[in-house]
Amino acid sequence: MNDIHAETLSKPTLLAAEPQLFVADIATSCEFYTKKLGFTVAFIYGEPPFYSQVFRDGARLNLRSLPEPAIDPELRDREHLLSASITLDDAEPLFLEVQTAGVVFHQVLKTEPWGARTFIVCDPDGNLILFSGRGR
């Protein structure tokens, strides 16, 4: 690309990321994310449904139904592989909210060595979702 053309292009700005989580059943997953984590269903697609999106504030998660796990469950559990990381201002109020909703935690709220306050939830398909907020 020549220098004149490069000068006229604006620098691209990344606006959001939407992780795709692999799930066994769209209805079960949508119920978990709405009832347990306070998300809202943006859409459900397919007949029968095989794709959906849930959101809460600026966080969006795409759910894709597959007949078998996309990631080896033993490897995921052994290596604590995260499916998504969601950043928020303060993790503690959300931790208390989802704790009251009866969510299974992979990791309870803790302060990391680098100062962030984090917790990890496990969805019905074993997807690990990290929530991270500023330290105190």
Image (spheres, helix red, strand yellow):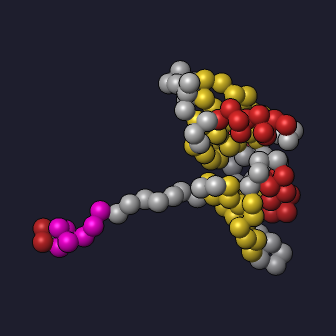
Range shown magenta: 5-11
Tell me residue 135's x, y (percent). Answer: 55, 27
Quadrant containing the N terminus is: bottom left
Q: Which residue is drawn at 27% across and 67% down?
A: 10
Quadrant containing the C terminus is: top right
Q: Which residue is drawn at 57% across and 43% down?
A: 87
Most foreground residue, 73 or 2: 2
Q: Can residue 7 be seen in this view?
A: yes
Tell me residue 45's x, y (percent). Answer: 74, 74
Residue 108, picture quadrant: top right
- From the viewer's perspective, tell me whether residue 106 is left or right of residue 11: right
Most foreground residue, 93 or 95: 93
Most foreground residue, 95 or 86: 95
Magenta span contains residue 59: no
Q: Residue furthest top?
A: 113
- From the viewer's perspective, tell me whether residue 46 is left or right of residue 92: right
Q: Which residue is drawn at 60% across and 45% down?
A: 86
Residue 48, picture quadrant: bottom right
Tell me residue 9's x, y (percent). Answer: 25, 70
Q: How many marks?
A: 0
Q: Can residue 64 be seen in this view?
A: no
Compared with 57, 91 (above or below) is above
Tell me residue 76's x, y (percent). Answer: 69, 40
Compared with 129, 30 (above or below) is below
Most foreground residue, 91 or 82: 91
- From the viewer's perspective, tell me whether residue 32 is left or right of residue 82: right
Q: Which residue is drawn at 85% across and 41% down?
A: 101
Q: Which residue lies furthest to the bottom in this view?
A: 47
